[in-house]
Image (tube, rainbow, N blue to C red):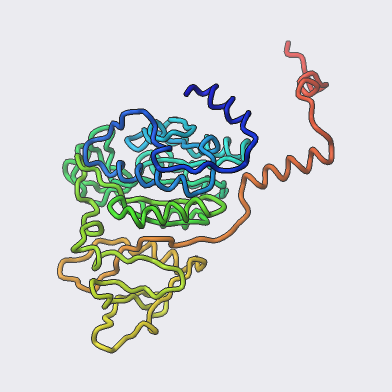
């Protein structure tokens, strides 16, 4: 279906009822061109499966991407979309959301696209709190350009551009988002599709900029980067799933928890009777201080350390704050009410001219 045909169909459809979609309705006719085994396949599938449940018509959904492997995403969604320019997807998405506030706008970006050349656009989007959804595919490598280290690559990473090991200190996307006053900060992983689906729904439901970091395995250039958290054997010990109002408990037998000693988190055993669930940290998505502490559960465990902090998955932080797009449109509505509808031709032909000699 051509773009003009889609637009004509949308304009002629007077019904406000959302059709009964299935995930297949959001799959385009384009051949998916990622490496076999790439984590992007799972993310694509879960996004397609989530779209029927958000209650928005296909013609009112837009996917905008930057540059990188993840940026091919809009081609594979049977929605409107745009494969834009390196690092600038947030700027394009902001303009679209301000001019068309009724649209559901999704930004697809990678750790290189958004945290290197696009880092300023990334933090400005979060600061402004534009009502869009940003999915950050983090594989800690530049996959499209064949294996250079990225802004999230751990120190010491040996890659094609760092043959002696990276000496750069990496970005922590969740901490960066908290520092930019983001209103929704969450993390999921490609190899837990059920949880990923749940996080995609939470991302859509938030009013404001929703930043969902997704651990995504690059099977060719950085295979196994997140194996500690994705492997079914190590996941119970290394990952903790956050639930609002619930204590921080993890472990194969739910025998470990996290408590706060002042503002210092520590892992304790629940098996020896010294501590119980009542002693543990209870998750509160609206507590910015504790949410930031959770974002710092980031360091790799030392060998032999059985009581290191687990990596959190789920919604770390979610609060309401006025959105940028609502603010702009409220100003426009106020001025139209006060001064009437403007006349562009009159403005261009107005007295504010000068002669250059």
For this rendering, which residue is in front, 337 or 205? 205
Q: Quadrant of residue 36?
A: top left
From this viewpoint, which residue is outermost toward the top? Answer: 357
From this view, report whether residue 46 is shown above or below residue 74.
below
Name the residue located 47 percent from the left edge and 32 percent from the top edge. Answer: 81
User: Along the horizontal axis of the image, is 140 left or right of 210?
Assistant: left
Quadrant hosting residue 340: top right
Q: Name the residue: 27% across, 37% down.
A: 143
Q: Position of residue 276 (x, y in %)?
A: 34, 85
Figure quadrant of residue 113 = top left
Q: Is residue 347 above or below residue 95?
A: above
- Residue drawn at x 62%, y 29% is 11
Instruction: Say which quadrant the C terminus sits in.
Output: top right
- How many badges with numbers are in the image? 0
Q: Viewer-proximal residue, 308 or 270? A: 270
Q: Relative to 307, say whether 13 is above or below.
A: above
Q: Is residue 354 left or right of residue 43?
A: right
**Can you give x and y, in whole percent of width and height, for residue 38 in the image?**
25, 41
Q: Position of residue 160 (x, y in %)?
A: 19, 37
């Amino acid at each position: 279906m051509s773009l003009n045909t889609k637009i004509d169909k949308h304009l002629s459809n007077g019904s406000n009822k959302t059709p009964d979609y299935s995930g297949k309705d959001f799959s385009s006719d384009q051949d998916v061109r990622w490496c076999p085994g790439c984590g992007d396949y799972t993310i694509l599938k879960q996004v397609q499966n989530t779209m029927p449940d958000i209650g928005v018509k296909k013609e009112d959904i837009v996917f905008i991407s930057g540059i990188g492997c993840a940026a091919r995403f809009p081609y594979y969604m049977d929605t409107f979309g745009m494969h834009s320019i390196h690092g600038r997807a947030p700027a394009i998405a902001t303009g679209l959301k301000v001019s068309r506030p009724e649209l559901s706008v999704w930004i697809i970006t990678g750790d290189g696209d958004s945290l290197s050349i696009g880092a300023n656009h990334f933090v400005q989007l979060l600061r402004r709190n534009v009502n869009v959804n940003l999915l950050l595919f983090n594989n800690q490598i530049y996959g499209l350009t064949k294996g250079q280290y990225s802004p999230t690559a751990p120190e010491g990473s040996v890659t094609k551009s760092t043959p002696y090991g990276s000496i750069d200190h990496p970005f922590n996307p969740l901490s960066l988002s908290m520092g930019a006053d983001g209103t929704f900060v969450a993390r999921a992983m490609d190899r837990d599709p059920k949880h990923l689906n749940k996080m995609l729904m939470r991302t859509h439901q938030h009013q404001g900029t929703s930043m969902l970091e997704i651990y995504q395995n690059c099977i060719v250039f950085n295979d196994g980067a997140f194996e500690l958290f994705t492997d079914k054997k190590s996941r119970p010990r290394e990952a903790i799933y956050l639930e609002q109002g619930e204590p921080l408990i993890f472990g194969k037998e739910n025998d470990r928890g996290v408590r706060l000693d002042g503002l210092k988190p520590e892992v304790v055993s629940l098996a020896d009777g010294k501590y119980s669930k009542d002693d543990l940290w209870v998750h509160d998505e609206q507590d910015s201080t504790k949410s930031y502490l959770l974002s710092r559960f980031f360091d790799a465990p030392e060998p032999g350390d059985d009581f290191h902090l687990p990596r959190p998955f789920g919604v770390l932080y979610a609060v309401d704050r006025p959105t940028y797009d609502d603010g702009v449109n409220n100003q426009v509505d106020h001025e139209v009410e006060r001064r009437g509808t403007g006349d562009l031709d009159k403005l261009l032909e107005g007295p504010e001219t000068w002669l250059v000699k």
